[in-house]
Amino acid sequence: MHSYTRPDATTPVKIPQTQTAAVVPVLGAKPEIRNDVPVRQPSQLAPGECLVKIICTGVCHTDLHACRGDWPIKPVTPLIGGHEGVGTIVAIGAHTKDSPVKVGQRVGIKWLANSCLNCEQCRTGLEQCCRQAKCSGLTVDGTFSQYAVSWVQHVTPIPEPLDSQAAASILCACTEPSSTAGARIGNWVVLPGAGGGLGHLAVQYAVAMGMRVVAIDTGAEKKNLCMTLGAEKWIDFKETQDIVGAHCAVVTTATSAGYAQAIDYLRPGGSLMAVGLPGCAKLESSIFWTVVKNISILGSYVGNRQDAVEALEIAAAGKVVVKYQLRSLSQLEEVYDGLAEGKIAGRIVLEVTQ
């Protein structure tokens, strides 16, 4: 064990040499639970890096795609997945200047692990599009572990009233406050995939912003969830496809089916916001009707640092409630199976045993 004395404490924090983590050994392999994964020690942290002791971590469809390697952008393997981690900072790299966070603080580790903060994209709030961006659980090790290394400029402080398990899921959903694509208070917003992990949060953020929600998904459990959370209308896509006149569609589903008819049911001047990321699907639409109806097609795969702060504040104020099921890190493969089969309503959060 390596002893590290926090700058704001007299009691050393015990940091082990090894840890338990879920590791994808090669592209497309199933995650393996290993108990001998090295922990980066405080003396090994570069300036600007921090070591976070993970409390819990959410599981997202993105993690499944990274594990399978079915995106055009391939993960770096061997890889520790996960990008919805909440934990406590136990060390900060020496010579780190002007850190916005401190040792002992509870923070979240998001999909966007780091960016240069100086390029045009970073300066204009598109940090996620930075050419030097590092992504948790894809290009750098993520949060399916007991300890994770991240960067002080990108971890997100967790508001005190918000429990760690709820905060974990919101770290990924931080795109939602900005993804209603110009819709105004009172406008109808269609949410394909509304009963899923990201979708059920999208329902609540839209309602909190004054939108009227049409939830699209399938199954009684997901219908009950969406209606309970404030959706005004429910459409089971296996029973009907009649949707007319929405102002906006925010597609959170990870399949191409949710995108197929969006242009058809949007009213003139409407907008399609693509959020869910199917592996190799195409976004096809009628060019004629897209032009004639003045439809806007936009994409938002994750929010920036300010979006994350705002999303957590909305949840901390009680306007968004995360519906999650707790699992253990050892059940990750089972969770992936449930995601692949579309059987999970709400979010899954893994408790990380220390």
Image (cartoon, rainbow, N blue to C red):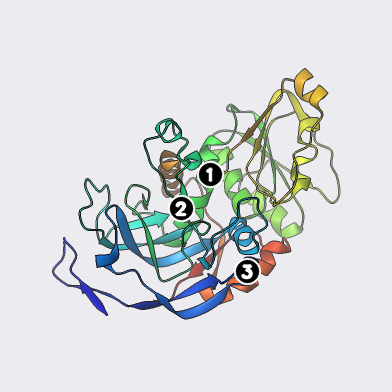
Figure check: 354 above or below 217: below
Residue at mark 2 to residue at mark 3: CA–CA distance? 20 Å
Quadrant containing the N terminus in the rendered view:
bottom left
Say what secondary structure mark 1 lies in. loop
| Mark 1 or mark 3, earlier in chain | 1
Q: Are marks 2 and 1 in contact (CB under 8 Å)?
A: yes
Quadrant containing the C terminus in the rendered view:
bottom left
Q: Is residue 298 left or right of residue 44?
A: right
Q: Position of residue 25 (x, y in %)?
A: 56, 72
Residue at mark 1 to residue at mark 3: CA–CA distance? 22 Å
Residue at mark 2 to residue at mark 1: CA–CA distance? 9 Å
Q: Position of residue 145 (x, y in %)?
A: 45, 70
User: Which residue is the site of mark 3?
Assistant: 335
- The residue that appears at 47% across and 36% down in the rendered structure is 126
Amino acid found under the numbered disc labelled 1: Val
User: Which residue is the site of mark 1?
Assistant: 302
- The residue that appears at 75% across and 25% down in the rendered structure is 267
Numbered circle sitting on residue 29? none
Residue 332 in view (yes/no): yes
Question: In front: 91, or 235?
Answer: 91
